[in-house]
Amino acid sequence: MKRILVIGGSRYFGKTLVTRVRDAGHEVTVLNRGSSAPPPGVGRLVADRDDEEGLRAALGPRAFDVVVDQVCYTPLQAAVARRVFTGRTGRYVMTSTMEVYDPATLPVAVRRAAPVTEAAPVTEAALDPRRLPPAGPGPCPHGPAYAYAEGKRQAEAVFLRAPAFPYVSVRSAHVLGGGRAEFTGRLAHYVERIGAGTPVAVHEAPYATSFIHHRELAGFLHWTAEQTFTGPVNAASHGAPDVIALCEAVAGQVGRRPRYRLVGQGEAASPFSFDRAYALDNGRAAALGFGFGRVADWLPGAIAETRRAA
């Protein structure tokens, strides 16, 4: 039995992770700002992770075998966590994102040093956050997509540049499934528009991308918490459909052919329509022993859940 702290864990795959770890016999504690109560049999700590002294006070003398950080979005949050959990945990797992590889948000110097090619899925070696230019002060001037991706990159960099404990960053593919629990509404965008006969905005030659089912990601985080490897690891189901394939899968269930509105390179489009390549290679995780499923096997069920929740 391990003592596991989950920071966040109050919605979507975080909730599934908490119950899976509890049911596996571990002693689980959730730390959040009090937004919702944890499931039965799970401990609870209330604190704002941005408040370092408040976080220390909430933790008291507690220590953990593993911390799974679901809600680390900035280098400042990472720096607070690094200071607070030094000496308190034997392993730290941070949920990151495939957006760290997005060529559209990578600093120019990084793109030139390690360009993402169109020929092959992206491996973890394509991005070493320790080589990033330091984050500048103040809010990001480049918009929310850049801020999200760069925040995750810089957060990873904080943990990797001066390791205080064994650290893993799980670079997750786009998460789908769960009906109403999938709060982003990205899959619902397609179900609603195709069902209504409304055109879907897509790039003329969209690139493939990577997905993972919410339960599979919860299972992967649980598995990662019990392992000993460190460093970045990609998490994605096998198969990388493009947005047209996604639309076709939705159309097969709603009984209506999709209509498209083509947009040019660099223009805004529907979710998961990409004019650049950065689909994930999941080879490292597979070599370490995790068996991913196939997008083609679970996507129909995810679409059906979304239709029922509409």
Image: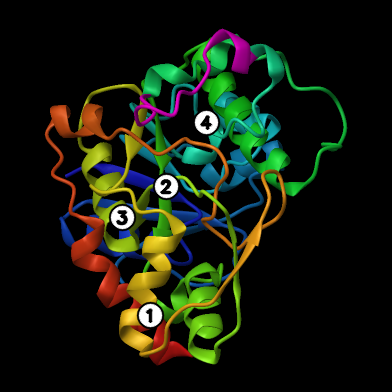
- Magenta segment: 110-123
Question: Are discs 1 and 3 less than 8 Å apart at CB?
Answer: no
Return the disc, 4 or 1, that comes first in the chain's sequence: 4
Q: Which residue is mark 4?
A: 101
Q: Position of residue 119 (x, y in %)?
A: 37, 27
Was residue 120 drawn as part of the magenta stretch in this picture?
Answer: yes
Magenta: main secondary structure: loop
Q: Which residue is mark 1?
A: 251
For image coordinates 72% across by 40% down, the residue present is 147
Circle 4 SS class: helix
Q: Which residue is mark 3?
A: 218
Distance, label 2 to label 3, CA atoms, is: 20 Å
Q: Position of residue 182 (x, y in %)?
A: 47, 71
**Label 3 is placed on what type of residue?**
Ala
Distance, label 4 to label 2, CA atoms, is: 12 Å
On screen, 112 above or below 187? above
For image coordinates 53% across by 84% down, the residue present is 192
Return the disc, 4 or 2, that comes first in the chain's sequence: 4
**Label 4 is placed on what type of residue?**
Tyr
Q: Local crowd at mark 3 within 10 Å, few (<14), some, or many (≥20)?
A: many
Q: Which residue is mark 2?
A: 209
Q: Local crowd at mark 4 within 10 Å, few (<14), some, or many (≥20)?
A: many
State the quadrant of the N terminus: top left
Return the residue nearer the eye: 252 or 43: 252
Return the residue nearer the eye: 245 or 179: 245
On screen, 260 above or below 74? below
